[in-house]
Image (spheres, grey):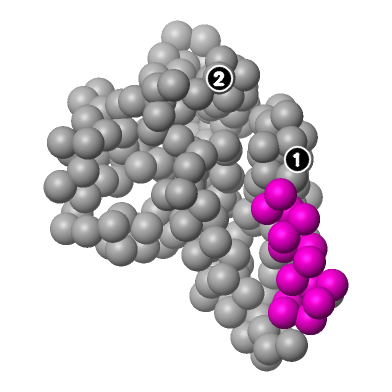
Amino acid sequence: MSFFIKYITMRVTVYCASSNKVDKKYYNETHRLATSLIKNNCSVIYGGGANGLMGHLADTALELGGNVVGIMPHFMTQVEWNHNNLTELILVDDMHRRKAIMLERAEAIVALAGGCGTLEELSEAITLKRLGKITCPIIIVNTDGFYNSLIDFLNKMIDENFLREEHREIWTVVDNADQVYNAICNAPKWQADAIKFAAV
């Protein structure tokens, strides 16, 4: 065990893929993120899976002595095969409750590379922050340009007045996981009354 956790400084929800077939570079990035978060005494909250980047995130954090909380719907234990060695595994009735708990517990949100589930989770977090329902930092890890198209799309929404210029501060984009913790600490402050300027 490389690090000894004396206290938890921050609860970080991480969205990422459950696929075992993704390129090694995404596993490497996941490893760096888990290492950085545990080194900085963060608790990891994620989808509870044992496969793909989800499993690697949990395994790495646990090996380093970290606190890892997984949240998964009962039905999905047959698909993503829930991780059996977590600090805490919360089984819920459906995807809606899973996402709600991940958001409720988050003091920061990080999106690694992922598929449609990760995209849905990230989109919901951005929408809720726009409305002031959450105020925590949202960090997008753009590994090897993975999220370039999404970032261009978000900017297009602003450029064409579907979002306001102020909404660029909802999310922060970093090139790699080593930049995540500093990005969380230095993210622009967001107000709970953001609904006042949610409309364009």
Rendered-image quadrant of the N terminus = top left
Q: Residue at x 22, y 36 (%)?
A: 79
Q: Residue at x 75, y 40 (%)?
A: 174
Position of the C terminus by quadrant: bottom right
| Residue 81 pos. (x, y %) | 22, 30
Q: Which residue is mark 1?
A: 174
Name the one closer to the observer, 129 or 163.
163
Determine which quarter of the picture holds residue 93.
bottom left
Under mark 2, the amino acid is Asp
Residues at circles 2 and 1 in contact by the CB criterion of under 8 Å: no
Q: Amino acid at mark 1?
A: Val
Element type at mark 2: loop
Q: Residues within 10 Å of mark 1 (few under 14, many from 20)?
A: some
Q: Is residue 86 left or right of residue 141?
A: left
Between 137 and 145, the residue placed more toward the observer is 145
Q: How far is the residue under mark 2 from the one under mark 1?
A: 19 Å
Residue indicated by mark 2: 23
Pointer 2 or 1: first along the chain: 2
In depth, the one of 30 and 36 nearer the eye is 30
**Residue at image coords 58%, 24%:** 26
- Residue 141 percent across, percent down from the top left: 67, 39
The label number, if any, that marks residue 26 in the structure image: none
Q: Is 121 one of the magenta-colored residues?
A: no
Stretch in magenta: 149-164
